[in-house]
Amino acid sequence: DAGVIQSPRHEVTEMGQEVTLRCKPISGHDYLFWYRQTMMRGLELLIYFNNNVPIDDSGMPEDRFSAKMPNASFSTLKIQPSEPRDSAVYFCASSFTSGRRQTQYFGPGTRLLVL
Amino acid sequence: QKEVEQDPGPLSVPEGAIVSLNCTYSNSAFQYFMWYRQYSRKGPELLMYTYSSGNKEDGRFTAQVDKSSKYISLFIRDSQPSDSATYLCAMSASTDKLIFGTGTRLQVFP
């Protein structure tokens, strides 16, 4: 298996522009998570889906952020309009639950810089 | 107060040393405890998983959970330069949503 795939790996954009981050989870996994990582705040959960349905979006910072999962093999995180404070590394992770065990597998991340 | 507290380091040790990494937490409902390792410019990867209290050993790594003190630890024996990474603790009350610590950066020098 190729693991969790994210694109693009790097994104540089100007303030006010729309940014779309993409994620392909591991086949067969039923959970998908979007995280944001910064030096100051660490790894923060933004939103997660179970079987393509959003379960908890309480971590989404504001209405400028939106996420979709149209099918089991694809998800997007969109920022519109982008601001410099959105600069961070965005990770997608997927998992499946087996009994009491759940292991989240992370993608390589998208490094976003908003100028 | 954050739900999970972790000293950011950096922690610098010589090769062969025993490393101790720690996290404290405030939510008594947490029962799943994990340690993730993150190399520079990579995504985190699961290193150790523990359910409820107790110890778990895997090679040079030992994870300890003390629920009465709300304190978890990761010990690395015979540390190697390849162990240089950021170590993040993570915990959860259920099998889905994880709460992560901010991570401790470890450097093992030859």
Image: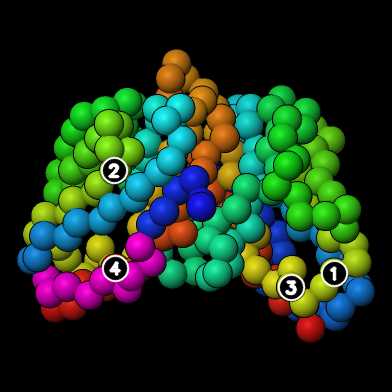
Locate residue B35 relative to residue A62 in the image: left or right. left
Secondary element at tag 4: strand
> Would residue B13 be counted in the magenta stretch?
yes
Discs 4, 2 touching: Cβ within 8 Å = no
Mark closer to the observer (4, 2): 2
Q: Are marks 1 and 3 on the same chain?
A: yes
Q: For the residue marked with disc 4, what is the amino acid? A: Leu
Q: Residue at x 88, y 53 (%)?
A: A63
Q: Is residue B34 visible?
A: yes
Residue B8, labelled with which disc? none
Q: Please give the residue where the numbered disc 2 appears in the rendered image.
A: B72
Query: Label 4 lies in what chain?
Result: B
Residue A108 picture quarter = bottom right
Look at 33% across and 26% down and name the residue there: B51
What is the three-letter code of the residue carrying label 3? Arg
Mark 1 — residue?
A82
Q: Amino acid at mark 1?
A: Ser
Give the residue number, with chain letter if any, for mark 4. Answer: B106
The residue lying toward the viewer, choosing from A54 and A95, is A54
Instruction: Check disc 3 and report the residue beneath it.
Output: A85
| Disc 3 chain ID | A
Q: Which mark is nearer the camera, 3 or 4?
A: 3
